[in-house]
Image (cartoon, helix red, strand yellow):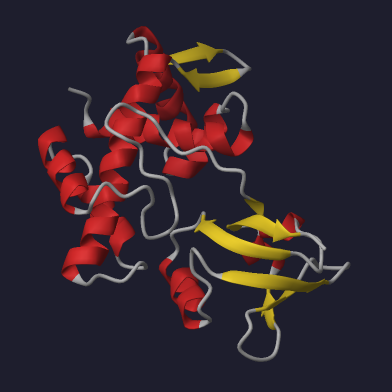
Amino acid sequence: MPTISVENYLKTIYKLENRADDRVKTKGIADELEISLPSVTSMIKSLSDEGLVDYEKYRGVMLTDEGTRLALKVIRKHRLVELFLVETLGYSWDEVHAEAERLEHAISDELAHRMESYLSFPRFDPHGDPIPSADGTIHESTAISLDSVEPGARVTMERVLDQDPEMLRYLERISLIPGRAFTVKERLPFDGQMFIELGDGAPTALSHALSTRIMVVVEDAS
């Protein structure tokens, strides 16, 4: 059974792989986990010896099939826990990430299955992130980041990539949550700030940094 440290490394590499669609640099892992670069290099060599990653010096690392399987197993438990806490215990979506970080390593496969069944086999967690199935299947999305959408487009928010509680509370306050449709009204050329129309008043301003963390599906690009 993988240690908590190994599971965290695999989950982080999977996340960075999907973000960059390429090999992951050890510095990126060190920054994400807030761990020293020598420590990361040492762990990566161990993971390589165990057949969980493919590591090439100076080129970076990528998960093997077995490494991906184990990473998705942890991610599945994390996202099921988040949804379970929201749906059954009344947690808000800005409270669940830290709890799930702890519980994802503790629950068994059987408990994860029972939680999934109780929740009627959900496809997404409270933040819109896809929940991997028990066999490792995960929803492939066509969503793009909001900052790349042209003014005039009608879009639906699919997920938010950041778990920062303050940011999530702000998004909930303006009713910008997964499943919400809105129109992109304007994008300022000098700093990327966007204005969106949620249909309930004046356009809402979003910073460029925030718009890069929101993934949307374009419904109408007219």
Q: In front: 93, or 133? A: 133
Q: Which residue is found at the position 37% from the left and 60% from the top? A: 126
Q: Quadrant of the C terminus?
A: bottom right
- Quadrant in the picture for residue 76: top left
Where residue 145 appears, as percent x and y from the top left, is 66, 54
Q: In front: 40, or 160? A: 160
Q: Is residue 105 visible?
A: yes
Q: Quadrant of the N terminus?
A: top left
- Quadrant in the picture for residue 217: bottom right
Q: Which residue is found at the position 81% from the left and 67% from the top? A: 151
Question: In the image, is 145 to the left or to the right of 35?
Answer: right
Q: Is residue 106 visible?
A: no
Where residue 104 appears, as percent x and y from the top left, is 23, 44
Where residue 160 appears, as percent x and y from the top left, is 51, 58
Residue found at the very far bottom of the displayed protein: 201
- Numbered-mark total: 0
Q: Is residue 30 above or below residue 187?
A: above
Q: Is residue 201 above or below residue 217?
A: below
Q: Which residue is found at the position 51% from the left and 54% from the top? A: 161
Where residue 210 appears, as percent x and y from the top left, is 62, 65
Question: In the image, is 154 to the left or to the right of 93?
Answer: right
Q: Is residue 162 above or below residue 154?
A: above
